[in-house]
Each structure stands twice: as structure tokens, then as C-alpha cells.
Image: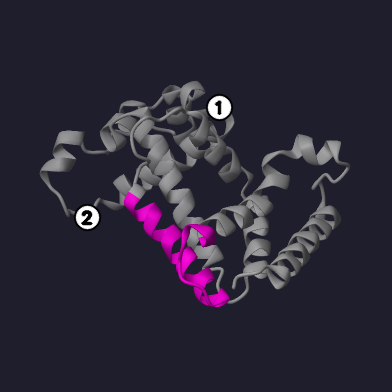
Amino acid sequence: MSPMPSDAPSTSAASAAPGRAASPRAESTRRALLAAAREEFAEHGIAGARVDRIARRAGVNKERIYGYFGSKEKLFDAVIETALDELVEVTALPGDDPAGWVGRMFDYYRGHPDLARLLLWEGLYGRTESLPEQRRRIAHCQDKIDSLAAHLGREPSPEIGRLLLTLIGLALTPLAFPQLAELFRTPVDGPQAATEMREHLTAFVRMALANADFS
């Protein structure tokens, strides 16, 4: 058996050369580790994930995980950061069409079921310190609050934040809790069912916002 690649710099070496571009091979290894870790963490969570399985899926030596990310927990943080960046890029801001935004969120969560699982695992982990990249994540959320507030002719406020959290919950709940959808006889288990759920969600949002008192 051929040896696993050993192309990543050590943590100390990486920190000694800030700003230096990674080699194509090193960047390819990093992407492979993130992809393998995303599958592993979505399936097993932080506590249940195994670095040896991640390394095996990525086709590298498990020491590369520590060389690139420092720890299993920091690898999970990097996976979450990458997944949320992809979500932000695709779903844009809610302001022009909040109902359409909920529909796009629903579509994205349905097409990326691992994201819902990752977010649930992150919430269950019992982290005592701040979330990774918390300032940047808050800034993304503030952009959404500002966008929705402008659409509604309101000032950004905790009320708008609660509204956004509710909209996200509408898009996420049918997919994050399929057992509940099954109990209510509304499983999202095929294209037709997904279309019907999406139409229900967007119609509900339009009705709710049309009848809301924001005076």
C-alpha cells in the first residue's frame, strides 16, 4: 500500500508564514479534508466523529488534520464556516421578497440535508465559548435584519431579528425534523411533496406579513 500524502505544513510552519498562499496540492488536501469531515460530522456530530475515518475518506494521513486545523473541534468549526458561507452566497438577502427568500432557504436545506444536521449538532455540542467566527456570523445576520427592516419600512430591531429567526425556522423545520412531518402526514419525501410544502411556506409568509401590524 502506498503511503498517505504528507503535503500539509505543520501548524507552527503555517503560522510562521502568514499570508503565504497554499500550494495547489495543499489546498486540494484541505478541501478533501473539509468534504470528508462534513460527511462525518453530519452523520456523527462532534463527539462521535472519528479523525481516522475523516482521514480515510479524504485519503490522507490523520496527522494532516492537526497540521491544517489544530484539532477535531476546529475542523468542525471550519466545516460550519464553509457551509454557512455557501448558504449566504446562494440565498442572498430577504428584503425584496421575504417569502421568496424562505422558499430559497427551503430549497437549499432540502438540497443540502447535511447543513441542517450540522447546525443541530452545533447547537447540541454545549459550547461554552463564543461561536467560531462569531463576529462575521453576526455581521451576516445583521445584513439580513437590515434588509428585511428596510423592506418593511422599519428600523432594525430585536423584533425584526425575531421575525427573521421565525422565517428561518419555517424553512428548516420540515427538513430538520422529518419524523414530525411524518406524524403530521406531511413528509417532504419527493418532488411533489417538496413543491407543495414550499408553496405552503411562501404563501404563509406572504399572508403573515400582509396582515402583520408594524405600525
Quarter containing the N terminus: top left
90 relative position to 15: left or right: right
Residue 77: x percent and y percent? 39, 39
Residue found 47% across the figure and 22% down from its top: 47
Q: Residue at x 49, y 60 (%)?
A: 88
Instruction: From the image, tell me which residue sits under label 2.
Output: 21
Instruction: Assess disc 2: are there few (<14), some (14-19) or many (≥20) residues with their C-alpha within 10 Å of its C-alpha.
Output: few
Kindly identify the amino acid type of the residue bearing the numbered disc 1.
Answer: His
- The relative height of residue 103 versus residue 65 in the rendered view (above or below) is below
Q: Nearer the viewer, residue 64 or 206?
A: 206
- Label count reads 2
Left or right: where 31 falls relative to 124: left
Q: Which residue is mark 1?
A: 44
| In the displayed structure image, the side of residue 199 where residue 37 appears, left or right | left
Query: Which quadrant holds residue 130?
Result: top left
50 within the magenta span:
no
Residue 146 is drawn in which quadrant? bottom left
State the predominant SS element of the stretch in magenta. Answer: helix
User: Residue 185: x, y in percent?
Assistant: 88, 42
Relative to the observer, which residue lies in front, 54 or 77?
Answer: 77
Tell me which label, 2 or 1, sits earlier in the chain.
2
Question: The residue tagged with tag 1: helix, strand or loop?
Answer: helix
The residues colored magenta run 135-160
Residue 70, relative to residue 114: is it above or below? above
Q: Locate residue 5, reporting x and y percent.
A: 33, 34
Where the C terminus falls, by quadrant?
A: bottom right
- Depth check: 50 or 81 in front? 81
Q: Nearer the viewer, residue 26 or 71?
A: 71
Q: Amino acid at mark 2?
A: Ala
Residue in the picture at 62% in, 69% down = 98
